[in-house]
Every structure is written in C-alpha cells, then in structure tokens.
Image (cartoon, coloured by chain):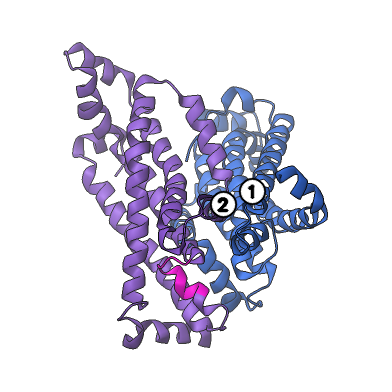
Chain colours: A blue, B purple
Amino acid sequence: MIVRWALENAGQIWSLTLNHLVIAAPPIVLSLVLAIPLGWWAHRHGTVRQVLLTGSGFLYALPSLPLFVILPVLIGTRILDPLNVVVALTLYGLALMVRTATEAFDAVDGTVRENAVAVGHSPAQRFWRVDLPLAGPPLLAGLRVVSASTLSLVSVGALIGVRSLGYFFTDGYTRSFVTEIAVGILGTVVLALAFDALLVLGGRILLPWVRATDTRTGAA
Amino acid sequence: MSFVLAAFAWMVDPAHWGGPGGIADRLIQHLLYSVLALVVAAVIALPLGLWIGHTGRGRTVAIGLSGALRALPSLGLLTFLTVAMGVGINQVLLPSTIVLAVLAAPPMLAGAYAGVEAIDHDVIDGARAVGMSERQIVTGVEMPLAAPMILGGIRSATLQVIATATIAAYLGLGGLGRLILDGLPVRDYPRMLAGALLVTLLALVIDAVLTLLQRLLTTAGVRAAIGSG
C-alpha cells in the first residue's frame, strides 16, 4: 500500500524532498562554519564565553513554531517565506554548535598545545594543525545531532505553509490518510540517515583518528 | 517594531486573559500537557538509564535508539498516531502525550546513564566493600552523585517538550500553540506573536526554576567532588 502510493506520487515526493533538502542544508553547513570561530573566540575569552553560552542557551529555549512566526517581524521577511525557516534552524544549529565548539576547544590537551608552540608553530599554524584537528571528533558528534534535529524540524514549517516533506503530515492529517503520513515520516528518516552517513564518511576521510577517540556520539 | 508593541499590548490586555480560551487557560493547558508527558517519560527513562549506567549493559542499544528517535519528526509522528489510532478530537491527548514522551525520553535516558557512568569506579567499589547492597549503591551513591547530570537531562527534555507542545494545537488540543495557529488564518499577527513570546517566556521561566533546583539538589559534597556548581 505504501509502496504503491509512493510510486503513484513519486513526482510529488521527489519535489518535496528537494524542497526539504534546500531548507535543511544551509542551516547544517552554516551552524558548523559559524560555530568554529565563535567557539574559538569563546574558548579564549572569559567574557565572550559567558555572553555566547548564555545567548545560545536562550536561543535553544525558543520553540520552533513560535520562532518561525517571530522572525518575519524581526528580519522583515514575509511570514510564509521559506527563508524564515532557514534562519530559525540556523539559529538552533548555532545554539547547539557554539557550546559544542567551545567545549571541544577546551578539551584540547594543554601540553599538546605547548609542544606545538615549542616546536615553532605560529598561532595560526597552531589553530589549523593542532587545535582544530583535535577538536574535530566532538565537533563531528555535535554536527550529527544538529543534522538529525534540523531535518526533523524542517517539517514543522508545514504548519505555516512552507513546503517540505512536512506537507505530507498536514495533508495526510486533513484527509485522515495514514499512508501519506507514513511516507513523509519514512522520507524524513531516510534523509536524516543519509545525511548522518555522509557526515560519518566525511569524518573518516577528514579525521581518520575519529574512530579511535569518538566516544561522545550518544551525548544528549 | 510596531508589531512587537502590538503583540505586547495584546498580551497584557486583561480581556485576553480570562475565560475559556484565554491566555491563563492556554498556559495551564500547556503546562498540563507538558508535565503529563514528562512524568510518563521519566517513569520509563530514568530507571532504565540508572540500570544501564549501573550494569553497563544495553548502552549501545540505548544510544542507537536515542539517535533514531531524534530523527523522527514530531509532527509526523503526531499526525500518524492520531490518524492510525482513529481517535476523535476528544482523545488526541493520548497521541500527543506519546509523542512528547518519545521526545523527552532520550535526553533523560542519556543524562541518567552518562551521570552514573561518570562516577569514579573506586567510589562504587568502596561502597560495595563496606557491604552496601546493589540497591543501596544505586539509591545512596549513584543517584546523588549523578544528580546534576540527571537533572541536566530532565532540563533539556523539559525545554524540548514545552517548545514542541505548541504543535499539539494542530490536532485541536489547547495550549499556547492555539494562539499561533488560530491567528494564522485570520492574519492576527499580534496574537500569533504574543503566543510565540508566551511560549518562550514559559520555557525560560521553567528553565530558570530547574537550574535553581539543580543547584539546590547538588549537595556540597558532590559539588566539591565534581568541582562545579
């Protein structure tokens, strides 16, 4: 039944999946790219740390549906603009990643750092060759959490009319059609698994030492 | 900016507070749904987490399951259960409680087993050496020492549940989500924004209360042992 419906509606599933991807990908990438300098900054300065970590705690407390509604007011977009969802999910991703990045840089062994300086690394070399690679595994673990939660939150946008796989939830609900909802759930979970597999693969290529040191994948 | 002012004006207008469907009513409903789901999740997840932490068994399964649950879209699960269970508009509290409990369980589980796992093994061996039973070790040693992390898990579960309870309004349930979803079709943006601000305020207030509780429940000995407040 599910397979038949999916085959009959393959075109719609494909276009909604693409929409879902287009909304989910920028927040996942941006939260990592922005969290690294912010986390580094927070790691080095006590005051910055306080401000950033309190701020990200506050952001994380904002519920997603209300945030989709508040944002248009703050950034001047239309309420049905998919951009609202992208910005809101980036803020969520950041809230999680800034904390993760700060703690990841904190956890880099001080003696390793001193050794790097002792053998003549400049501050920039030290960052790129020592701090960032060593912070890699916890950063990857955090990014996997961000990826899963972002892909699942995109669907809430359907409540305010932003098209994604979440459309199958609202449409299936109004039609009391459980197969359609199941296809939406399966699609979201498959996307989340695919992203997770990509991240793990990327981690193995970029950080070959992850398998030996990554024990944090189960952290909340 | 005038939007925000209009929302605040809407929020503080006494006419919007009382009666069925008023802000007070919605606040209480929102809290009731959230507490119900959190209690259900805690009854299942906390003992399980303590058991996993104490015995070291089932950790891989718990991590895998938590990860899989995180990827499940709450809105999808909510509509799926409601339609699949064939419940009427009056019984949607059941699917919404299940969905919110599913959301709350992984952080609670993780907080409990990670908290117990983080305890120095010498401490537990010491307790065993002075003749404490396994039950006494769990309640008298592991629970107090893991308390900060257990509460941390409960805190993060609570924030997520309060935030997500807003989408229960889509099924016709009450709660603060009603202000947002009822405002949408009639373009009553001040009401929607007021709803959004109220949920956020509620989450922040509850989080502050739990942070305080976390501090109070962390005994001086534990604080000294783990070196933090």
Q: Residue at x 57, y 42 (%)?
A: A142
Residue B152 can be seen in this image: no
Q: Residue at x 42, y 47 (%)?
A: B101
Q: Amino acid at mark 2?
A: Phe
List the residue tagged with mark 1.
A182
Q: Residue at x 49, y 40 (%)?
A: A106
Q: Secondary structure at mark 2?
A: helix
Q: Which mark is residue A115?
A: none
**Is residue B179 in the magenta section?**
yes
List the residue tagged with mark 2.
B80
The spot of residue B88 in percent (x, y) is 46, 60
- Check if mark 2's residue and mark 1's residue have beta carbons within 8 Å: yes
Q: As rendered, which of B34 and A174 lies closer to the eye? A: A174
Q: Amino acid at mark 1?
A: Ala
Q: Secondary structure at mark 1?
A: helix
Q: CA distance from mark 2 to mark 1?
A: 7 Å
Q: Looking at the picture, does residue B3 appear above or below residue A74?
A: below
Which chain is mark 2 on?
A: B
Q: Which residues are magenta?
A: B172-181
Q: As rendered, which of A111 and B221 lies closer to the eye? A: B221
